Image: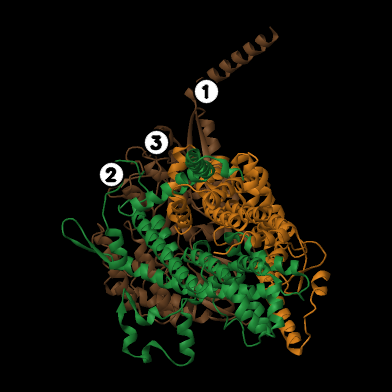
């Protein structure tokens, strides 16, 4: 307010000083977070990147002389190309590593494609209903839906195992309701490697034997038929578990965003004679687009890294159908004495998640001007 | 409730609306039931003895006499085959006694300490960082922000050993601070707070600045009080994350069983018995693990949703 | 003045305490023992063993750490150079840890060699070096449900049973129980190590002596695998999940299978949780040509190569596995068999000879569960294929070809 009186020269210095002061304050405010991130995240991530170019076994003390050797891109080659060349020109095959990597990528992709849209859509629908004016007992429903989110993933995975055993709670309950579903036809939720798409195709009489020769073409270590398996029954169980646990968090976020939409917007639309569906399609959905972006991003990051549930329930089985990329990182690092390979697997996963988030952002922001 | 019904003058009770309402209720109730029923069975089965959990998990209504299914008249443990399959069961506290013997009170105590300390840390440091990223211009501002976001995308499992080595070098293994310090800041929280501070107007702070308050004082006196809703959301997310964390406690605390958290303890119980888990005790432990969080959430849920909405999670 | 005297007192006290502490520290060595947790009773028995050791060696104190997720925890400790002094080593992990150099050689350090089974010492020998004294072991044997055999009017299995007897019995015992649930003759987990006894009984092998060549491409391997898969495809055997169980012992305990091939870890589970189950145990059946084989799963006390107190560590390892330490565990009669031959009788008595002998007999001829570094890839491929073979999607031949391919690749790494 007193600015007009200030002389030009001192003003420049004050501005510069002010800017310097602000930057200093900024760093000061960031300092605790930066230090902790640096020590416990950035340095470990740097170490992982470094180790991905070595053959460290993850057991020999890492600072020991000769604990590892530099192997350049060999770990990445093993995973993506299925072989690498030693310094002496010897070609070392790694078909299994490549095959496992693409199996895990396939499984993870089916997992993400199944879980992310389902949980987003269900969360949105539930949030819209809970947000309705006519609804009584909002607090109850909010708590009910959020409840699974507050349980530990390890604990809830074990409880799901207990419920989904073949002779367990789920099957016997369904059996009690549907008379044809008895102990001889129970679905083996936790130990059935058959792909869901394969099962559905089989219902229509389509099997690998009669579908044609193209099904046996191999790419990246898997036949076309295997690529098209869909998630296995066991993976489906884990997908149900994860959808079930995260729906609440997503719903709360949607609900919060819905409550931010001023009621005047709806009232104006109602006066214009728009019906409920049009209001939802043309007002609610567009206004929620930024929130949707956030929810989908969180979902993508979480789903691509799915680990706890696999670790507890299936350890990647049956028949490798729940082997996800994050679980493969663990297997390579802790079961196979190949920490360098594990690090490389993790870096590739990071790149994939990053690319997906970026793509998603481009796709959403184009239409939403975020 | 009354307020919202009276402020609905434009509502038209068309048959379509009624139909929609019915569908809405149905969807809600079905999903609420689906979300809750595993807990109903968990709680019910935690009050059974082992044979009853194994052979008839579906009974959910407790009736006296107490513990009748657990032992035969001679006092021997019953085998699963002898447990009746009815909707009712005779409750017992066997599972809770067994889990209490397994040092559960200690695990509960440790978990509470960790969760509270980590939550306090995040409330302070995440909001400081979020504020700096939202309001203060400093070189590298955007770089810092995107780096923090990027760290969320690295699979935590690969960081286990590097983190362990760092903690060992800092002599922080098997200590309280060893778990608290690395988790006292998190990317999600910083993101949440940044979004919030960007969504609230700048004027109040500017006024305070003109009054000559320094940034830090102003932050604690003026900015944080305005941020209560967002802080509530952050507190719940943090508390819940810290309470349920598994990999970090495993890494940092396994060596000292006096420091174990609930998730570690339950995982230890599971490891000890392998496939032959003592389900009644495990389920009792799960109930006790979840209960405190459930109470906290139920109490704060109103502020929680408000907090998330004020935090302007708008992408 | 008053203040000063208080201060003096504090200083003097501090000096006394620290001097005493230093004197104690000189005498007292603390070593760490890391392992995984077993049942409460077994944990207590270990603590009792350690207490006996400390009583006999007052200058050594032992910090026992039983941890969850053992493999992950100890690997982090190794990698950071912070290894415990003494720790459990599963025979299947020995090659990895020996190659990584975290294990001290046991040559010349292990006492009571005569009192240990040859097959166990062999399981802890890698590349010609004996690394560690066995802690305890389990041997695969054949468990049978007496009531179900009686009901079917069959004779109980005997040690001279052959594959044909097994098949015939399994066929006769397959059916339904009173509740209308499927009952199988035999439970066959889809795991490499469960199939291996059949391979060895048939006279086959996975690798040659010095682990340089894969020897699975044999008639013996095909015969053994076709037999194993054949029983499943014919509906007289199946994996545990097929009969609503998490593992073989559970399927057996619930009466959903008549025969199981578990190790002695199954004893305490059956005795404690299913006291009414009427069961017996005998050696695994032989190949029709007479070949006899089983698997031994065993754990040893490894001593860290990076170790401030190697002598004390070996003292502890030797005590825990020696005659005295073994006796302490044997008396308790747990499922696992104590390592010292001299304690075998005590164990048999504690566990009941009828049950104990069926398991113990295999100690003479059991094969170790151990393969070269990186062989987990082979197990995983085999197990995955075996599951598909159980489903009828793969043939024994497909499984063998896949497995050989992976095994050769692993050896060439």
Q: Chain of mark 2?
A: A
- Helix, strand or loop at mark 2: loop
Query: Is C298 above or below relative to B79?
Result: above
Q: Nearer the viewer, residue B83 or B220?
A: B220
Would residue C405 appear left or right of C73 to someone viewing this image?
left
Mark pair 2, 1: CA separation? 38 Å
The disc placed on residue A66 is 2
Residue designated by label 1: C24
Q: Chain of mark 3?
A: C
Would residue B19 appear left or right of C182 to someone viewing this image?
right
Residue designated by label 3: C307
The disc placed on residue C36 is none
Circle 1 crowding by C-alpha within 10 Å: few under 14, some 14–19, many from 20: few
Q: Which chain is brown?
A: C
- Helix, strand or loop at mark 3: loop
Q: Nearer the viewer, residue C348 or B149?
A: B149
Give a yes or no on whether discs 3 and 2 share a subunit: no
Spot occupied by residue A87 in the image (x, y as percentages of width and height): 18, 55
Q: Nearer the viewer, residue A190 or B183?
A: B183
Q: Quadrant of residue C285?
A: bottom left
Mark pair 1, 3: CA separation? 21 Å
Would residue B292 appear left or right of C265 to someone viewing this image?
right
Visible residue check, residue A165: no
Q: Colour of chain A?
A: green
Q: Which chain is orange?
A: B
Q: Mark 2 or 1, which is nearer the eye?
A: 2
Q: How many marks?
A: 3
Mark pair 3, 2: CA separation? 19 Å
Q: Nearer the viewer, residue C118 or B211?
A: B211
Check whether the beta carbons of the residues at disc 1 and disc 3 lie within 8 A of each other: no
């Amino acid at each position: 307010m007193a600015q007009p009186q200030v002389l030009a020269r001192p003003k420049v210095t004050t501005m510069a000083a002010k800017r310097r002061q602000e930057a200093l304050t900024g760093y000061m405010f960031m300092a605790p977070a930066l230090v902790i991130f640096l020590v416990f995240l950035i340095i470990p991530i740097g170490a992982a990147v470094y180790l991905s170019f070595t053959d460290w076994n993850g057991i020999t003390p890492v600072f020991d002389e000769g604990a590892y050797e530099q192997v350049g891109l060999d770990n990445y080659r093993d995973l993506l190309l299925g072989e690498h060349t030693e310094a002496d020109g010897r070609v070392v095959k790694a078909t299994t590593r490549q095959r496992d990597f693409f199996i895990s990528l396939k499984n993870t992709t089916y997992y993400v494609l199944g879980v992310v849209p389902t949980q987003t859509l269900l969360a949105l629908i539930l949030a819209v209903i809970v947000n309705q004016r006519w609804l009584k007992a909002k607090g109850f429903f909010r708590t009910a839906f959020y409840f699974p989110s507050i349980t530990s993933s390890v604990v809830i995975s074990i409880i799901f195992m207990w419920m989904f055993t073949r002779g367990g709670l789920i099957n016997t309950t369904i059996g009690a309701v549907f008379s044809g579903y008895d102990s001889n036809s129970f679905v083996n939720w936790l130990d059935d490697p058959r792909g869901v798409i394969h099962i559905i195709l089989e219902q229509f009489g389509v099997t690998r034997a009669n579908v044609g020769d193209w099904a046996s073409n191999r790419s990246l270590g898997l036949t076309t038929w295997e690529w098209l398996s869909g998630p296995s029954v066991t993976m489906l169980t884990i997908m149900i578990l994860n959808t079930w646990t995260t729906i609440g968090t997503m719903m709360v976020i949607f609900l919060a965003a819905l409550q931010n939409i001023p009621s005047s917007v709806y009232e104006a639309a109602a006066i214009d004679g728009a019906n409920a569906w049009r209001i939802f399609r043309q007002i609610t959905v567009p206004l929620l687009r930024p929130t949707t972006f956030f929810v989908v991003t969180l979902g993508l990051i979480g789903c691509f890294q799915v680990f706890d549930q696999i670790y507890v329930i299936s350890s990647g089985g049956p028949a490798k159908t729940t082997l996800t990329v994050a679980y493969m990182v663990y297997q390579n690092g802790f079961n196979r004495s190949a920490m360098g390979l594990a690090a490389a697997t993790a870096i590739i996963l990071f790149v994939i998640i990053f690319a997906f988030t970026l793509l998603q952002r481009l796709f959403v922001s184009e239409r939403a001007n975020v | 409730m009354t307020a919202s019904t009276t402020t609905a003058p434009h509502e038209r009770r068309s048959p379509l609306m009624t139909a929609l309402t019915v569908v809405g209720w149905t969807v809600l109730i079905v999903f609420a039931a689906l979300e809750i029923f595993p807990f109903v069975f968990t709680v019910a089965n935690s009050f059974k003895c082992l044979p009853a959990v194994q052979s008839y998990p579906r009974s959910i209504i407790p009736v006296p006499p107490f513990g009748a299914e657990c032992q035969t008249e001679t006092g021997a443990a019953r085998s699963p085959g002898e447990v009746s399959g009815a909707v009712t069961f005779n409750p017992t506290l066997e599972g809770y006694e067994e889990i209490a013997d397994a040092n559960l009170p200690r695990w509960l105590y440790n978990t509470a300490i960790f969760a509270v300390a980590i939550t306090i840390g995040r409330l302070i440091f995440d909001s400081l960082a979020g504020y700096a990223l939202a309001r203060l211009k400093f070189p590298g501002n955007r770089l810092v922000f995107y780096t923090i976001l990027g760290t969320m995308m690295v699979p935590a499992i690969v960081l286990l050993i590097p983190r362990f080595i760092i903690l060992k070098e800092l002599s922080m293994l098997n200590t309280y601070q060893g778990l608290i310090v690395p988790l006292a800041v998190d990317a999600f929280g910083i993101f949440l707070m940044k979004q919030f501070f960007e969504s609230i107007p700048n004027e109040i702070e500017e006024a305070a600045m003109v009054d000559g308050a320094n940034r830090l004082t102003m932050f604690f006196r003026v900015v944080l009080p305005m941020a209560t809703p967002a802080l509530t959301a952050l507190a719940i997310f943090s508390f819940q994350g810290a309470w349920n964390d598994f990999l970090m406690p495993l890494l940092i605390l396994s060596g000292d069983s006096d420091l174990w958290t609930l998730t570690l303890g339950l995982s230890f119980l599971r490891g000890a018995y392998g496939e032959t888990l003592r389900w009644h005790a495990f389920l009792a432990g799960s109930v006790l693990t979840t209960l405190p969080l459930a109470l906290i959430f139920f109490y704060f849920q109103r502020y929680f949703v408000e907090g998330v909405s004020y935090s302007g999670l708008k992408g | 003045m008053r203040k000063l005297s208080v201060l003096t007192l504090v200083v003097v006290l501090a000096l006394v305490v620290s001097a005493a502490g230093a004197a104690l520290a000189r005498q007292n060595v603390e070593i760490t023992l890391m392992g995984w947790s077993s049942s409460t009773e077994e944990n207590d028995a270990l603590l009792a063993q350690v207490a006996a050791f400390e009583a006999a060696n007052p200058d050594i104190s032992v910090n026992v750490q039983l941890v969850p997720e053992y493999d992950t925890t100890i690997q982090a400790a190794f990698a950071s150079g912070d290894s415990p002094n003494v720790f459990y080593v599963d025979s299947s992990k020995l090659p990895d840890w020996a190659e990584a150099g975290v294990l001290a050689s046991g040559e010349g350090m292990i006492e009571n060699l005569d009192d240990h089974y040859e097959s166990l010492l062999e399981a802890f020998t890698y590349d010609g070096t004996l690394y560690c004294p066995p802690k305890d072991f389990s041997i695969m044997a054949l468990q049978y449900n007496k009531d179900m055999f009686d009901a079917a009017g069959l004779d109980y299995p005997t040690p001279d049973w052959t594959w044909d007897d097994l098949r015939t019995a399994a066929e006769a015992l397959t059916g339904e129980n009173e509740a209308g649930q499927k009952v199988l003759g035999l439970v066959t987990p889809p795991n490499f190590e469960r199939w291996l006894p059949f391979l060895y009984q048939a006279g086959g092998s996975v690798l040659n002596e010095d682990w340089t060549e894969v020897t699975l491409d044999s008639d013996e391997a095909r015969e053994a695998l076709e037999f194993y898969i054949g029983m499943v495809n014919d509906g007289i055997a199946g994996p545990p999940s097929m009969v609503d169980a998490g593992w073989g012992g559970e399927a057996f305990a619930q009466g959903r299978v008549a025969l199981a091939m578990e190790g002695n870890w199954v004893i305490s589970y059956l005795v404690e949780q299913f006291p009414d189950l009427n069961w017996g145990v005998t050696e695994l059946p032989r190949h029709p040509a007479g070949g006899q084989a089983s698997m031994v799963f065993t754990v040893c006390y490894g001593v860290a190569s990076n170790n401030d107190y190697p002598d004390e560590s070996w003292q502890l390892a030797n005590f825990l596995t020696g005659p005295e330490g073994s006796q302490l565990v044997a008396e308790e009669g747990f499922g696992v068999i104590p390592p010292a031959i001299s304690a075998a009788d005590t164990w048999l008595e504690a566990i009941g000879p009828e049950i104990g002998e069926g398991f113990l007999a295999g100690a003479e001829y059991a094969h170790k569960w151990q393969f070269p570094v990186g062989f987990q890839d082979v197990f995983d491929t085999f197990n995955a294929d075996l599951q598909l073979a159980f489903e009828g999607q793969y043939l024994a031949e497909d499984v063998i070809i896949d497995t050989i391919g992976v095994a050769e690749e692993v050896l060439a790494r």
